[in-house]
Amino acid sequence: MSTHAERPRIYDGEGDTLMQREHEDLADRLILVPDALPSKVPDRRPHIRIMWGQHLLEDLLAGRYRSLVCAVNAQDNSHGIISQLAALLPTSQWDVASITAYAKQFATGGDRVKVLKYDMDMVEVLAVLRPAGRPHLTIGDLKAAYKIVVEMIQHKPGRLPSASVSFLGARANCLVDESGTEPSFETVLRTMYEAGYAGDVYPSPAMWHASPTGMFPRYPFPESLQRIRDGGY
């Protein structure tokens, strides 16, 4: 007979022990840290769910989302998720050439970031186009873009549920902070959240190697993180 004091088993047979031995030395693993215990009084604040260990393309093709927020540029989108998605969706009429050609129509002068709409039938892509002449996407650009994204979702609730890339680890559409370096994931999440976004965010593949750093499953992060940073417990 089982008791509440026993440790829950995850796998059948000897799976739990075998998985501990198999993965204790691997770099590509994640350590999830609960931000709060389950409560009878749910937290009513909106949260961004962080989709650790999940595969964005698979979830999009399975119909889990109605909109995707990602980046697009007017030069080459052959390696971007927007082109990968267009190639995999059977009813999409977009391809790499037409995606880039459409972005070029909006890549005019000015210092304003734009959010372009690509209707791919199953999914509507809300693509962030950085200002013309700027080599990288900035945190300021991201904040302005997500304010537009939030308004677009509010005006058309059919765009929910929504998913977003993290904009980190990109090649053609690099995101930089005020110092010209790639920002932390926390900075990206805070920027999205403060703009009003509360969809799901998929970490970059490189973040799958973040162990032994503990990961929270949603944002805002708990106050305990700041207390630790301040030297408390």
Image: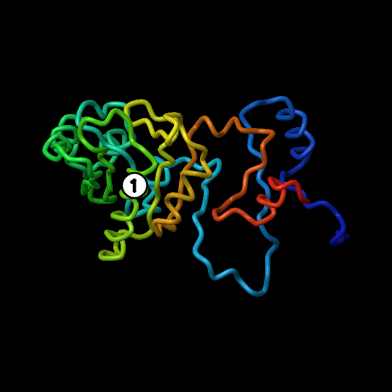
Q: Is residue 125 above or below residue 137?
A: below
Name the residue that disc number 1 marks: 69
Give the image quarter of residue 18.
top right
Image location of residue 75, percent across then percent down: 21, 27
Horizontal relation, residue 143 to residue 211: left or right: left
Residue drawn at x 87%, y 58% as measured from the top left = 5
Q: Residue furthest bottom?
A: 41
Q: Which residue is at 67% across, 26% downward?
A: 26
Query: Tag 1: Cα neighbours inside 10 Å, few (<14), some, or many (≥20)?
Result: many
Report the residue at 76% width, 50% height from top: 232
Local SS, label 1:
strand
Q: Position of residue 143 (x, y in %)?
A: 36, 49
Q: Nearer the viewer, residue 92 or 35?
A: 35
Horizontal relation, residue 213 to residue 145: left or right: right
Q: Is residue 207 left or right of residue 144?
A: right
Q: Quadrant of residue 133?
A: top left
Residue 76 in percent (x, y) is at: 23, 26
Give the farthest residue toward the left: 105
Task: Indicate the amino acid at tag 1.
Answer: Val
Q: Is the residue 68 above or below the residue 28 in the image?
A: below
